[in-house]
Amino acid sequence: MTTFKTAGFAGETLEIIAFRLHEQEFCVKTTTIREIRGWAPSTPIPHSPPDVIGVMNLRGTVIPIIDLAHKLGMKSTEANERSAIVVAEVHNMAVGLVVDNVSDILTIRGDQIQPVPEVTTSFDKAYAEGIIAHENGMICFLNLARMFKERDVEDLAA
């Protein structure tokens, strides 16, 4: 029996920001987003985890820049002029997430979120709230708090 993890959103209206990684669409709640920036190179950090591209200065605060595609088990993002850095608040810390591009801001009903199917082994379903069927295709709804455990974020800050 599959437990429906997204039941907590039933009856809610959510605003989400959708973005692309390679040919797939993902989203997060807009309440987790501080800002969206154009691509800018970051400063590499020696011996950092493979999904950490480096760090950047965001108005006097140094934040880690994460290759979100790599974190999700996908091929690393090759950043270009269309890429964006989505600055998110995760466990009270700013984290920059590199995405191919930001595609939309949408308002959805909680009942539009369906459970992640049991068909893939390369994707950690704990990272996802569910799947949203949208007119332009399927959108994977990510949970950044679960993706970046509090200890991981503290390690990034160190």
Image: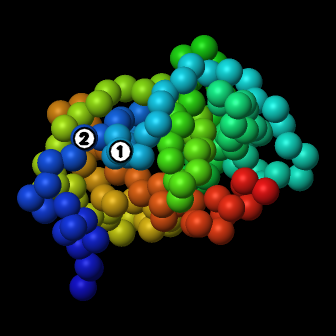
Q: Which residue is mark 1?
A: 31
Whether residue 75 can be seen here: no
Quadrant housing the N terminus = bottom left
Q: Are marks 2 and 1 in contact (CB under 8 Å)?
A: yes
Q: Amino acid at mark 2?
A: Glu
User: In the drawing, does residue 143 fall left or right of residue 43?
Assistant: left
Q: Amino acid at mark 1?
A: Thr
User: In the drawing, does residue 141 fall left or right of residue 2?
Assistant: right
Query: Where is residue 51 shown, x and y percent of the image?
Result: 70, 49
- The residue closer to the viewer here, 58 or 49, is 58
Q: Which residue is mark 2?
A: 15
Position above or below: 58 against 15: above
Which is nearer the N-term, disc 2 or disc 1? 2
- The residue closer to the viewer here, 144 or 75, is 144
Position above or below: 129 against 75: below
Quadrant housing the C terminus = bottom right
At x 19% / y 38%, what residue is drawn?
A: 107
